[in-house]
Amino acid sequence: MLAPFACDPALSRGRRFFQSPAPTRTEFQRDRDRIIHCTAFRRLVYKTQVFLNHEGDLFRTRMTHSLEVAQLGRSIARSLGLNEDLVEAIALAHDLGHTPFGHAGQDALNECMALYGGFEHNLQSLRVVDELEESYPEFNGLNLSFETREGILKHCARRNAELINAQEPGGVAARFLTGMQPSLEAQLCNLADAIAYNAHDIDDGVRSGLLTLEQLQDVSLFARYHAQTLVEYPSLQGRRVLFETIRRMLSDQVYDVITATRATIEKYTPTSSDEARQCPPLVQFSAAMYEESKALKSFLSRNLYRHPQVMKTTDGARAMVQELFSVYLAKPQEMPTAYAQRSDVPRAVADYLAGMTDRFATREHARLNASHTK
């Protein structure tokens, strides 16, 4: 049962290209299925979060992260009466535009594109589903519904929002110009994204040996649940202690979001999804949980993302992306014909690079270096 402020697929603002409704699926279920079957989604299994693809088989990838976001999002959506299918579609698609090599690759590509309009991974995710996927004979992209596309475009620089809005007046970028909010389902995905990556980066950080349980005692959000775990299971050892701590932390964050969001919805009482868009952000943590989540994120930034060992590998990845960009820009013929023949060469290079997996980018770098040294 959907709440009145949830997105109703029967009232969707539709697709860019008309298609007759599916006989057995709602519009948002159809979006989810298209995303799961697209090429860009399959590539996520070889795109990494913090640790590069060759560093271990058990570290998170963009795909496992997206699945975790979808699971958390659906759990919260069910309790709030939001549309679970829309939440799942947004969650599964939100990282489709990410480059290889995590944030290092994204930052490097943005620097390379500084003279050509820059690079934003959220905008690239929208480009993937709107233009770059080649699944249908009648149009480019996946032709997703407005509501899914709105959620995918999580952030957007004003300059890009103006360009998109000029082509699609009042469309998915309009809210960045008017100050309105996205749907509650999109807001929920944004928060589920943060909950998921904070938790799994703790797990990956400890697994890698770069973080210790002793260090994490400085983080109240972790230390509280770690202490609870040891009180209830005093003889518990090894990874079971970490898993149980993270499980409790995740559960309480989910319950916190549900309770805090119910309170804001009760305060503003939106009676439709469009009214909810006109309210301040409604899906949120409590003030206390927000501060603890922010402190955890700061801890991970200092102790994991900027760890010398992580920086060493990501610096190499950054250089690899920059070198690939330079070669393709100078020699477009090194790219597949569909990219090489495009008139906007820098954007074609960015699209090609952003679509690469970690291991394909590494192979391409080796191939081009070998060709250059012959």
Image (cartoon, helix red, strand yellow):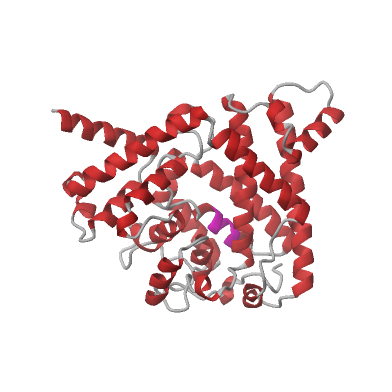
Which residue is painted at 59% across and 24% down in the image? 209
Q: Is residue 161 magenta?
A: no
Image vertical order of residue 264 relative to residue 201, above or below? below
Camera sees residue 24: no
x, y (%) of residue 267?
A: 78, 72
Segment colored magenta: 86-91
In the picture, which quadrant includes the N terminus?
Answer: bottom right
Which residue is painted at 30% across and 58% down in the image? 116
Which residue is painted at 70% across and 59% down in the image? 284
In-image side of 255 versus 69 (left or right) = right
x, y (%) of residue 277?
A: 62, 73
To which quarter of the image does residue 212 belong?
A: top right
Total of numbered circles in the picture? 0
In the picture, which quadrant includes the C terminus?
Answer: top left
Residue farthest along the right direction in this orientation: 231
In-image side of 202 versus 97 (left or right) = right
Camera sees residue 15: yes
To which quarter of the image does residue 118 belong?
A: bottom left
Image vertical order of residue 336 relative to residue 53, above or below? below
**Chief SS of the magenta region:** helix
x, y (%) of residue 214?
A: 71, 26
Q: In front: 88, or 98?
A: 98
Image vertical order of residue 360 relative to residue 112, above or below? above
Q: In front: 36, or 184?
A: 184
In-image side of 334 versus 108 (left or right) = left
x, y (%) of residue 139?
A: 33, 67
Residue farthest along the left direction in this orientation: 374
Q: Is residue 88 magenta?
A: yes
